[in-house]
Image (tube, rainbow, N blue to C red):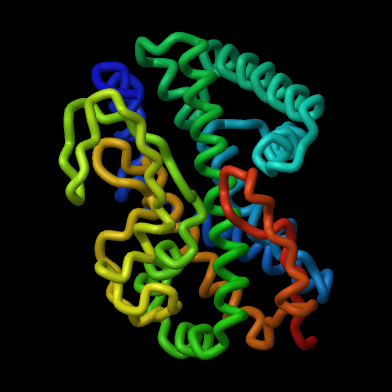
Amino acid sequence: MDQPQHGRYRKPLASKFTARRMRLLTERIERITVDHLDAMEKAGPPTDLVTAFARPIPAVMICELLGVPYQDRGSFQENVESFMSGETSDEDLIAAVTATYDYLTALVAAKRTHPTDDVLSELTDTDLTDDELRGMALVLLAAGLDTTANMLALGTFALLRHPEQLAALRADPALTDHAIEELLRYLSVAKTFMRAALEDVELAGRTIEAGQVVVASFHTANRDPERFTDPHALDLHRRVDGHLAFGHGAHLCLGAQLARVEMRVAFPALINRFPTLRLAVPAEEVALRPETADIYGVKSLPITWDV
């Protein structure tokens, strides 16, 4: 959306996703992470990192931010996964989207009547309609769950395929922030977005006329050799500045700081809990999500470790 519609929706959300507020969630994210690592250790290897670790952490966080009751989270997350996977039949896709919309409609009504300590309840104090709140909740859900889940799984896959980089991260915790930014650049799980020019723009000797739609490839930009030296290499020591994994400008991802906090906690916790972590299958057998999926990632990531 463009202004003024864009501002109407973004402004009330922006104050809910500040860097400071997201940092305050660190302790809760650490607890959720430890709980899932404990469960993995208790169950023993091998396991699928996607279902055991990568998906549950952002799922719990986004459900808590939206105020989804604990007993509803299983079916809620299952429906969301159905329409985000890129592999659901048309019939099942419609059923999953309908079920999610119906659930969010009831959730918004419940928050208006009995607000709790969550973002959705706070938004009921604005002039947003029930339909608008439901739509915003759906966007937050899709953007805050699938993206980070795939960064955690795909990021771990990338580290396991580059053992020298994984060893460097284990040896130097101070490298964590650089590692996260490099993984965001290197993987670019949100692949492309469309944008419409509001006015004529001259770019690289070509004119993009007002009203024309362009497809922006974040992945291509983040591998631009004019911007990044040896861009196809994963280098956790790289000082990444200006990558586009979260977009840019007025539409910069609102959840960027939440995603960073989740990764800042989860990656070190995982690799330090299991020093012998490794793939349980050859790398070429790891199934990637189809190209039709909105977000790049792995379907599953079989891992194992020494006990």
Residue 293 location, quadrant: top right
Q: Is residue 118 visible?
A: yes
Residue 217 drawn above or below residue 140? below
Q: Nearer the viewer, residue 119 or 225?
A: 225
Q: Residue visible at 48% across and 31% down?
A: 117
User: In the image, is 195 to the left or to the right of 183?
Assistant: left
User: In the image, is 259 to the left or to the right of 93?
Assistant: left
Residue 286 drawn above or below residue 105? below
Residue 269 drawn above or below residue 58? below
Look at the image and tell me in which quarter the N terminus lies: top left
Q: Nearer the viewer, residue 267 or 111?
A: 267
Residue 185 placement (x, y as % from top left) = 40, 64
Q: Residue visible at 67% across and 61% down?
A: 53
Look at the image and tell me in which quarter the C terminus lies: bottom right
Q: Nearer the viewer, residue 287 or 101?
A: 287
Residue 254 placement (x, y as % from top left) = 37, 40
Residue 249 placement (x, y as % from top left) = 24, 42
Q: Residue visible at 55% across and 83% down?
A: 162
Residue 37 drawn above or below residue 288? below
Residue 2 location, quadrant: top left
Q: Nearer the viewer, residue 298 or 72?
A: 298
Residue 256 placement (x, y as % from top left) = 38, 49
Residue 235 location, quadrant: bottom left
Q: Is residue 39 visible?
A: no
Q: Residue visible at 40% across and 58% down?
A: 220
